Image: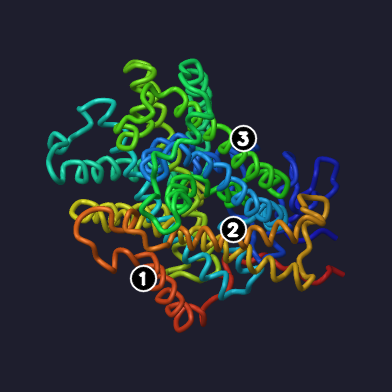
Amino acid sequence: MTRPGAESGSGGEPVRPGTGADGPHDDDSLAELGYKPELKRTLGNFHTFAAGISYISILTGTFQLFYFGISHGGPAYWWSWPMVFIGQLMVALCFCELAARYPVAGSIYNWAKQLGGPHVGWLGGWMMLTASMVSLSAVALAYQVTLPQISSWFQFIGDGTGKTDAAANAVLLGTVLVAFTTIVNAFGVKLMARINSAGVAIELIAAIVLIILLAAHVTRGPADALTETFGLGGDQEWGYFGAFLTASLASAYVMYGFDTASSLGEESKDPGRNAPRAILRALVASFLIGGLILLFALLAVPDLHSKELAVDGLQYVVLSTLGSTVGQIVLWCVVIAITVCELAVHTASIRLAYAMARDNNLPAAARLAKVSPRFQTPVLPAVIIGLVAVGILLINVNQPQIFSVITSIAIIMIYLAYLLVTLPMLMQRLRGRWKPAAGKFSLGKFGLPVNVLAVLWGGAMSLNLAWPRATVYNATGPQHWYLRWGAFLFIGVVALGGFAYYWFVQRKRTGVLATHAAETPGPPTP
């Protein structure tokens, strides 16, 4: 007798749950977690890879943060790129084992729940969801960094010289971008995947062409560029090492979000095998392409000591090295990269909210977890997350410094959410309870040392990101202690306040909603 819901093949034989005409679907893994499959499986290998790499978005991150690395660490800050990659690779390898074992939506939340229990899972999901909504606003602000440099026509508010012109215009451009990603995500994962995959293809081609063009204009060797520190750190207690740790934030702010490839597990074909590959490919490709862009930019810029390098960053390098025509083409590709990055961040946030709501772990959970029968995607979370992101954007109009603090803190919260996965995973390993999925991705005997390094890295980088530096958390204007210590204060309020709500209110309601629960086989028919 077949299980309820099983279909019959053309020869009358039952099709094993979790498989279909286009390959295994890992629906058995969903049933093991207590869920029934509801989202439409349409994503192939490149789609899942594109989701991970578009969240990282090399062109977005490098063009947005190159100036920060140069201004705080000089050209030698480039070494933070491989340092961050090695640390994040340890995390990604742990995630690969989890993606093979639990190919499920809202990956961080569900992984933390499976490894550390419902309380740890809720806290990890809450931290990630809050950070994702702030990140959605932060990425949208990147339009202002690039579009007005392409043409002054994009400076709709004022001429850009007024005190609040740039901030207000950034909110306007960002709001348009958030509205676009909300509409695309509401219309279903297939449309999102098509736009995202096309944008990623353009971004990858543009990045490779940019590397070739910059390599053709090299004017100095690596020994001259990668050892130049501009004498920074001389006034610090830790010398250049302290300056380097500050500059390394430019790399840490870019290389995350690779878990998005697994968060679409319920909409992917054979995610138990494809998601781990997509995670590694997205991270490695981003490291290689981004590292080469940064390297050849330092080797090709006409004047390595130019003040514009620490102000306009890569935009200055491209325009001064390649000329205005080629430079503007590259900047348009950066705009496309920002767009698909925003799309990926929004998509990951929706899947996380859906996963938590399906477990009745958010207010109005039944409505948030409802999947549109027409578009086969949760529509309400797309709209609500978009509205929250626009609301956060409005803070930037009159208080840009506070917004920059909150943006930095959002990245810390993502690193902490990762730590809420890798640390319980390490505890499970030490207790001998962790078993990778049979026949799928496994670290084998390297699992324990890799997991230990992932935890150490996550803790160290979270502390580095949160360190009360005036240059990061109170860069302009009068000095305030609450800005310097903003990371600890904000994260404390979000974590403690959110967990208090969960403990006293939501904890009593948690459990898979009946409309989303897996069907249990009935008694055998006589």
Identify the secondary structure beneath mark 2. Answer: helix
Badge 3 marks a residue whose secondary structure is helix
CA separation, marks 1 and 2? 22 Å
Of the residues tagged 3 and 1, which is closer to the observer? 1
- In the image, taking residue 397 as reference, residue 316 lies left or right, namely right
Q: How many marks?
A: 3
Query: Looking at numbered disc 3 in the image, what kind of residue is underneath it?
Result: Phe
At x 63%, y 54%, the residue is 91
Residue at which label 3 appears: 46
Could you tell me residue 241's position as x and y percent? 48, 51
Choose between 377 and 490: the one closer to the eye.
Answer: 490
Q: Which mark is residue 457?
A: 2
Nearer to the camera, 100 or 29 = 100
Identity of the residue drawn at 74% across and 44% down: 20
Q: Is residue 123 visible?
A: yes
Q: Quadrant of residue 381?
A: bottom left
Specify few, some or many for label 1: CA neighbours under 10 Å numbering under 14, 14-19, or 20 or more. Answer: some
* Mark 1: secondary structure: helix
What separation in Å lies between label 3 and label 1 (alpha carbons)?
40 Å
Q: Amino acid at mark 2?
A: Trp
- Residue drawn at 41 percent across, 68 percent down: 491
Left or right of 267? Residue 309 is left
**In the rendered view of the protein, which quadrant contains the N terminus?**
bottom right
Q: Quadrant of the C terminus?
A: bottom right
The numbered mark at residue 489 is: 1
**Residue 303 image offset from top left, x and y in percent:** 36, 25
**Mark sitting earlier along the chain (1/2):** 2
| Residue 346 shows in the view | no
